[in-house]
Image (spheres, coloured by chain):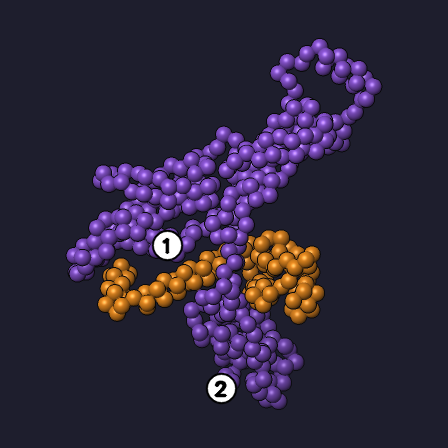
Chain colours: A purple, B orange
Amino acid sequence: MATRDPYDVLGIKKGAREEDIRTAYRALAKKYHPDLNPGDAAAEARFKEVQGACDLLGDAEKRSKFDRGEIDASGQERPTRQYYRDFADGGGQGARHYTFRQGGAPEDFEDLGDFFANVFGERTQPGGHGPRAGAHVQYQMNVDFLEAVNGAKKRVTMPDGKALDITIPLGAMDGQILRLRGKGQPGVQGGPAGDALITITVAPHRLFRREGKNLFLDLPITLGEAVKGGKVDVPTPTCSVSLTIPPGSNTGRRLRLRGKGVPDRRGDGAGDLYVTLQVMLPDTVDKDLAAFVETWSTAHPYDVRKAMEQAS
Amino acid sequence: MTEDEIIAMIRQLTQDDLATWCARGWVQPARRGNKMEYRAVDVARVQLICEMRDDLAVNEEGIAVVLDLMDQLYDARTRLRALGEAVLDQPVDVQRQIETLVRNTLGH
């Protein structure tokens, strides 16, 4: 490929100032950066051309040599490299894991089914003839916390009186959309029926709190259990398990029950259940306890608010 | 590629840059033992961020916005491609129907 005149490439005049070169380069590089033009195969060639022109004209020495005709514009092309789009736009795994979102907003589309639902769900009715697919119908459904965690089957009655069996998948999330193929409006002139799109709302739980795949639970323990340690029964989403409390466990200590959080339907590991201990005094402090603590605390004073004084 | 190798390879890149970008989630290298492993995709992404900052004069906030939109764009393109491939697996008359519907919806 014949190398174009670098001044033409950047769209500037021979006598342009260094600043103009930089400005022209920035504008063109922004326009043609291959990673910002995934669908444009020619962008890479244009970008390299612009980079080459800038490498030559941006360097005062090379530029004056070029202006005097001592060197030509060839050989300015940078070596071939791999752009981000080569990974992200390959259709394979590549950069699929990169969903950097500012503020950590959730992914809109959990899977291709949801993508269909969102792309085609709100379409306007085309004016064409012939068979057409029926419209999608949107529903909202409330689901118990544990039904969402463990998965469940539910039967609901639709507005038209028909019963519909719905499978809540393991680890379903609040706001997730379930799609039931063909359960929407019937098609026109033999076209396929639309889908039922069910947005699920997960109710909070009395004991568990959920963050992604992990569950959190506050566990009250007695003074004796806190001091001496021991085994206590802890509820999990599926059953109750025995948890060993180490001797001398304070309020706020967090213990982890590995794999007892939200099960994972893709099989790459269930979440964990985090248990935060809360030491509880008995409902009434009797004479024995009061007398013991009186004697003990006089002999063993300790400061639990040292850190607070330092902070003020 | 290790952290040292990527810093050696990309001229404008400092250790601080890399640490900041990783902390912000702009770059997400794989963890191998207690070291970070920069795969080819991570290197390409670091290179892009360097170019945005040094060549294109995009400021920090701008880079965050570009990356966010770019990730959404590539994600949408990947899904669209999968959709296109699914359409191509259909019988020809079904393909025609879909094409007609899409054209009607887009209005051309």
Q: Decide if residue A211 is on the left or right side of residue A143.
A: right
Q: Earlier in the sequence, mark 2 or mark 1?
A: 2
Q: Secondary structure at mark 2?
A: loop
Q: Chain of mark 2?
A: A
Q: Nearer the viewer, residue B39 or A290?
A: A290
Q: Nearer the viewer, residue A68 or A261?
A: A261
Give the residue displayed 60% in from the left and 53% down from the top: B24
The residue under label 1 is A113
The answer to whether residue A173 shows anywhere in this view is no
Give the residue displayed 53% in from the left and 53% down from the top: A268
Q: Nearer the viewer, residue B83 or A98?
A: B83
Q: Secondary structure at mark 1?
A: helix
Q: Residue furthest bottom?
A: A70
Q: Residue furthest right?
A: A299
Give the residue displayed 28% in from the left and 54% down from the top: A123
The residue under label 2 is A1
Labels 2 & 1 near each other (Cβ < 8 A): no
Q: Decide if residue A185 is on the left or right side of residue A145.
A: left
Q: Nearer the viewer, residue A294 or A68?
A: A294
Q: Position of residue A111 (x, y in %)?
A: 41, 54
Give the residue displayed 27% in from the left and 51% down from the top: A182
Vertical side of B83 occupied by A71: above or below: below
Disc 2 packing (10 Å; few <14; some 14–19; many ≥20): few
* Residue type, numbered disc 2: Met
What is the spatial separation of the Cα atoms under label 2 and label 1, in whole angstroms? 46 Å
Q: Quadrant of the C terminus of chain A?
A: top right
Q: Position of residue A177 (x, y in %)?
A: 38, 46
* Residue type, numbered disc 1: Gly
Q: Position of residue A262 (x, y in %)?
A: 51, 43
